[in-house]
Amino acid sequence: MGLTIHYQLAATGDEAHARKLVQQLRQAALDLPFQHVGEIVEFRGDECDYKQRAENDPNRWLLIQAGTFISLPVTPAERRRGVRRDMDVRPQHVIAFSTKPGQGCEPANFGLCQYPGEVSDPGFGKHKTKLKGWSWDSFCKTHYASDPRCGGLPNFLRCHLGVVALLDEAQRLGCLAKVSDEGDFWETRSLERLTKEIDEQSAMLAGFLGALKDAMGQAPGGSGVEAPIAGYPNFEHLEAEGQKLMPEQLMEMLKALARSNLLRGDAR
């Protein structure tokens, strides 16, 4: 949960062209007020497998985001039941870099990958991926840059607008495929709308967390249900505002779950 920018990059041509695009994007990132811009990393073959990386490997999250998946066929009956099957696809070649837009913000990774034309799995057999050229499908949660301890709204705007500015550069370079901005700034370029969205989402997160803790019978600061929003210095104010915004049906659902003891895990 939390306001996030989702984005896809795509390009055709050889690896020299892909490498040049990534280099140009990185240079644009260096020209932005990001907290940190990493070096370009390049991996091939088994080097692209994040599962072979230690938990504290600095490139592990980048390689997780470099992966993608394909949807597998389901029967009409399964489709009617909402069943879906996916198969992970590990890249064969990764050219990418990581950025840290600002304090509290998730890393924003950018790059281009090539994927195999076919993948196999013991349970699902062999399948064509239909993944051609170079592509990248990633996201950056900017929400928690709004934490007052990190600089509040000005810091959030610096991070969110910085990611959007880099996506603008990707569009100029001709390698931007798609953007989905939960703050609506990409589409509207409205700071007023973005500010309103981050305020409401923060309040909703705090309100939901508070209501969930109440339903579970937790004392403030108790363990069990945790979220970064709980650490905000103004959490209680946000919680009160969020309770006003929460749909009544959601509040009733939490109360019903509390009465059933399902949230406490001691139901029989």
Image (cartoon, rainbow, N blue to C red):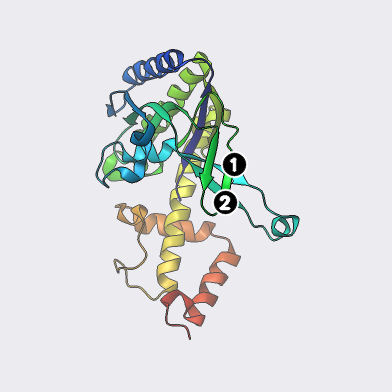
Check contact, mark 1 vs mark 2: CB within 8 A.
yes
Circle 1: is it few (<14), some (14-19), or many (20+) Cα within 10 Å?
A: some
The residue lying toward the viewer, choosing from 46 and 218, is: 46
Q: In this view of the protein, which residue sits in the foreground, 257 or 53?
A: 53
Residue 34 quadrant: top left
Above or below — where is 257 with respect to 232? below
Residue under pointer 1: 127
Residue 145 point in image, percent of width and height? 35, 40
Could you tell me the amino acid type at mark 1? His
> Label 2 neighbourhood size at 10 Å, few (<14), some (14-19), many (20+)?
few
Please state the horizontal and vertical placement of residue 14, each as a whole percent of the image: 48, 15
Q: Is residue 82 visible?
A: yes
Which residue was labeled with disc 2? 124
Say which residue appears at 45% left-offset and 13% top-offset: 17
Placement of 172 over or under 61, stated as above or below: above
What amino acid type is highlighted by mark number 2? Phe
Q: Position of residue 176 (x, y in %)?
A: 53, 23
Position of 177 relative to 199 (above/below): above
Depth check: give the residue in front, 196 or 162. 162
- Answer with left or right where residue 3 lies relative to residue 29: right
Q: Residue at x 29, y 66 (%)?
A: 221
